[in-house]
Image (cartoon, rainbow, N blue to C red):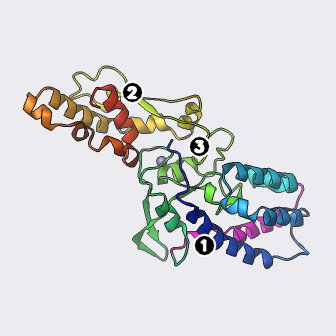
Amino acid sequence: MLKLKVASPDVAKQHLETLGKRFDEAMSAWKSPFAGYPPFTSDLKRVLQSERDFILVGDVSRLHKVVQQVKHKAGPLDHYLRNRPSAKSGVRQADMEKLITKLGEIFDYSKFIYKGVGWNAYKLVGSYSLRICPYCHLHHVNYHSQKAGDPKKLELRPPLDHFLPKSIYPYLAVSLYNLVPSCHQCNSSIKGDEDPSETMPHPFDTSVALDMSFTLKGSPLGIAGVTHEELGLTVTGNSTWDEFATFFHLQERYQWYAPEVTDMLKRKQFRDESDTVVQSLMRADFILGFDPLDYEKRALGICLRDIARRQGVL
Ligand SMILES: [Zn+2]
C-alpha cells in the first residue's frame, strides 16, 4: 500500500478555513431546544463543536479519538448507524434519521465535491499529485462519470474514498484525513460502506508498514506462449498483508494483469537472445517500460519492478 501524506500545511489551512466556515454556519443555525431529535443531541453537538478542528484536519489518531468521544456521548447513534435499518437503539427511528440528515448538512460532502471557485475536492486530489491508487496500485486514480443534468456528457470527477465510511461516520464526511484518493474499483466496487478500521492500516498512518512484493510461480524460461493462468503471480507482504490483500481481492485482481508481466518478460527474452549490440541498446527501462524510479507513478509499477528485479533486469 502506498502511504499518503498531506501535501503541505497550506492544504490543511485551506481545508480548515473552507470547511470550518461551512461547519460554523450550519452549527449556528442549529439551535436548541432539539425537539424531534434524540435525547443526547445537545451532548453530541457540544462534542462536535469542541472537536471541530480535529474533525476537519486532525490526523488519523485524532479522528479515532473523536470517534470514541461520539460513541461515549451518543452511543445509540453509533449503534444505529452500524446496524440500520434493523437497529434497535432505544431511540425513535424518525428522530435518529432527522439527526443523521442534520449531520449530513453540517458535514456536507456534496458541497465539497462541487467544482466551483475556492477549495474543493478537485483541488485536494490535485494536491497529492497521485496517479495510482494507494490501495491496489493497479489503477489510475481517476474516472469519468456522467455529467449531472446531461448524461450524454462525461466529466472527470475526483474519486475520494471515505476510509471510515460516511454511512457509519457522517461526522467525518469531509475530514481531510478521511478522504483517500483511490481508484473507482477499490472505492465503489469493493470497499463501499465496509468499515476497515479494525483490520486495515490507514493509508495516512505511516507508523504501520505494509509492503507488497511480487514473484512469479514457476520458471520464466520459455515464457513465449505461456498464458496468464499458467504464469501466475504471488503477492506477499508483512504480517498485515493478508487482511489487506483479502479485503481488496488483490491476488485475483493482479492475476488478471499477468499478460502485461508476460510482455515484459518477452522483451527480456528478446534482449537475452540478441547480439551484444542490441543488448547494449535495450536498457532496463526499455524492458520495464518505464523509468524504475517512477514505479509509484505507474499502474502495475510495484509488480513489474519487483519481477524485473527478480529476473535480473534491474
Ligand atoms: Zn485501487
Residue at disc 1, CB closer than 8 Å to ligand 1 = no
Residue 89 at least partly seen: no
Q: Which residue is found at the position 70% from the left and 67% from the top?
A: 104
Residue tagged 3:
206
Residue tagged 2:
215
- Marks 2 and 1, how far apart in space? 44 Å
Residue at disc 3, CB closer than 8 Å to ligand 1 = no
Crowding at dot 3, Cα within 10 Å, few <14 / some 14-19 / many 20+, comes out as some
Residue tagged 1:
111
Q: Is residue 97 magenta?
A: yes
Q: Nearer the viewer, residue 45 or 280?
A: 280
- Could you tell whether 73 is left or right of 200 in the image? right
Q: Using the image, determine if residue 5 lies above or below residue 17.
A: above
Q: Which residue is found at the position 22% from the left and 29% from the top?
A: 225
Whole-percent x, y for residue 90 in the image: 90, 55
Residue at disc 2, CB closer than 8 Å to ligand 1 = no
- Dot 3: element: loop
The image quarter in which residue 160 lies: bottom right
Crowding at dot 2, Cα within 10 Å, few <14 / some 14-19 / many 20+, comes out as some
- Could you tell whether 32 is left or right of 284 in the image? right
Residue 8 at least partly seen: yes
- Dot 1: element: helix
The mark closer to the camera, 1 or 3, is 3
Task: Give amino acid for label 3.
Answer: Thr
Q: Using the image, determine if residue 218 lies above or below residue 123.
A: above
Q: Which residues are magenta?
A: 90-115
The image quarter in which residue 280 lies: top left
Q: Is residue 169 magenta?
A: no
Magenta segment, prevailing SS (helix, strand or loop): helix
Which tag, 2 or 1, sits closer to the chain's start? 1
* Quarter of the figure with the C terminus: top left
Which tag, 1 or 3, sits closer to the chain's start? 1
